[in-house]
Image (cartoon, rainbow, N blue to C red):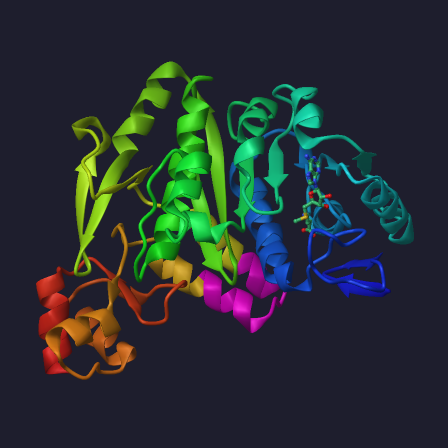
Amino acid sequence: MILKEGEVIFEVPDKLTITKKDEVFYNPRMKTCRDLSIVIVQAFLNLYHKVDKCYICDALAGSGIRGLRYAKEIEFSGDLQVFLNDINPKAYEKIINNAKMNKIENIKVFNEDANTFLSKHFRFFNIIDLDPFGSPSPYIDQAIRALVTKNGLLCITATDTAALCGRAKKSCLRKYLAYPLFGRDCHEFALRVLVGYVMRMATKYEISLKPVFCHATDHYVRVYLVTDRGAKRSDKTFEMLGYVKDVNGIKIIKKFEEGYEKGFSGPLYIGNLYDKTLVDEALKIAEERKLNERILKILNAISEEAEINQVGCFDTHQLGKILKISVPPIKNIINKLKELGFKATVTHYNPKGIKTNATLKDVIDVMYRC
Ligand code: SAM
């Protein structure tokens, strides 16, 4: 069947079960993820990319929709080339046909194992996108090696949320060398575990990675990190890592150097997950391109979250249960907190969660008063 997504038309097999067993994989539910990828990559290029060539790698390309959209929808005045790769020979053929259908010529298509492909492109790509089935962990090392060491953008999807969100603890330990945090804000901690893991993997190459955008949407989490080089910068990575314990919604944070203590989750990233300037540039691009309400809602929420460096959130329903009070509308709580001079917003990943620079006591006082 022929479909259209963004500015690209493409063909996928008639019978799609949206499982690994499909002849060629395409999941229409990931359109939101791909729309966001386009605006984040565009924002990154507008703000931070200062050279006149841009090589983008879609290492696990499936039908090719993601990479083909990069090739067609990203505006770049220099040489933009997209390298699409998939181990499945049928996907490889589909990508070539889909590119022809759209008359897209600034692409190259490969049919290799992603790690083999990446290992042949040492420090070559400006942007690498990893969008695998399940965990990206097996591809992280080679992706870091294949990225330019300064101002390279690493974009990673993980759909193994059972592991990252804490329902499958052993799996998280196996794949991310970290204990996950299961709770009301587990999606944020999934992002923090993934970011922390990728940052740790980069330090041995004396590369530091900084998260600039992340989101937890539907059944997956997605993170974007920018490279910088140097041993000293890499050493600073460990200052941004820590262990976290949730006690009735309050987060107790220990620095990485203090060591692991039983009952804590981590190591995970405890710094700011966003570059506010990049988020706002992405929002501006999304508005200009008239992307749908859902994209704008996610970007607007994240634009506010980006200003608040709180680890986790206050879940109003959890607090209501503990305090044995009925929960006022979240908008009222947020407006009251803002009236009092605090920053406050609903998190993009939990409609009952508030991110704020107010203390728990302030939030509880406001909940009683609303
Ligand atoms: N990025 C695609 C999109 O946005 O529609 C979806 C990719 S799909 C989730 C994962 C793809 O990885 C599948 O097409 C599969 O054939 C491919 N794949 C699995 N193992 C691989 C490997 N070791 N090397 C390269 N590709 C692989």
Assess whether residue 256 is covered by the magenta stretch. Answer: no
Assess whether residue 292 is covered by the magenta stretch. Answer: yes
Q: Position of residue 124 (x, y in %)?
A: 65, 23
Quadrant of the rendered structure where residue 270 is? top left
- Magenta residues span 284-299
- Left or right position of 28 against 292: right
Q: Would you place residue 282 above or below residue 289 in this image?
A: above
Residue displayed at 54% across by 36% down: 154
Q: Position of residue 177 (x, y in %)?
A: 39, 33
Number of numbered discs overlaid on the protein picture? 0
Q: Nearer the viewer, residue 307 or 259?
A: 259
- Left or right position of 160 against 261: right
Q: Nearer the viewer, residue 327 or 334?
A: 327
Q: Would you place residue 71 above or below residue 296 in this image?
A: above
Residue displayed at 13% across by 59% down: 359
Residue displayed at 68% across by 32% down: 114
Ligand 1 sits in quadrant = top right
Q: Nearer the viewer, residue 310 or 267?
A: 267
Predominant SS of the magenta segment:
helix
Q: Would you place residue 23 above or below residue 329 in this image?
A: above
Q: Position of residue 129 (x, y in %)?
A: 61, 40
Q: Is residue 364 visible?
A: yes
Screen quadrant of the C terminus: bottom left
Q: Would you place residue 6 above or below residue 73 in this image?
A: below
Quadrant of the rendered structure where residue 300 is? bottom left
Residue displayed at 30% across by 58% down: 183
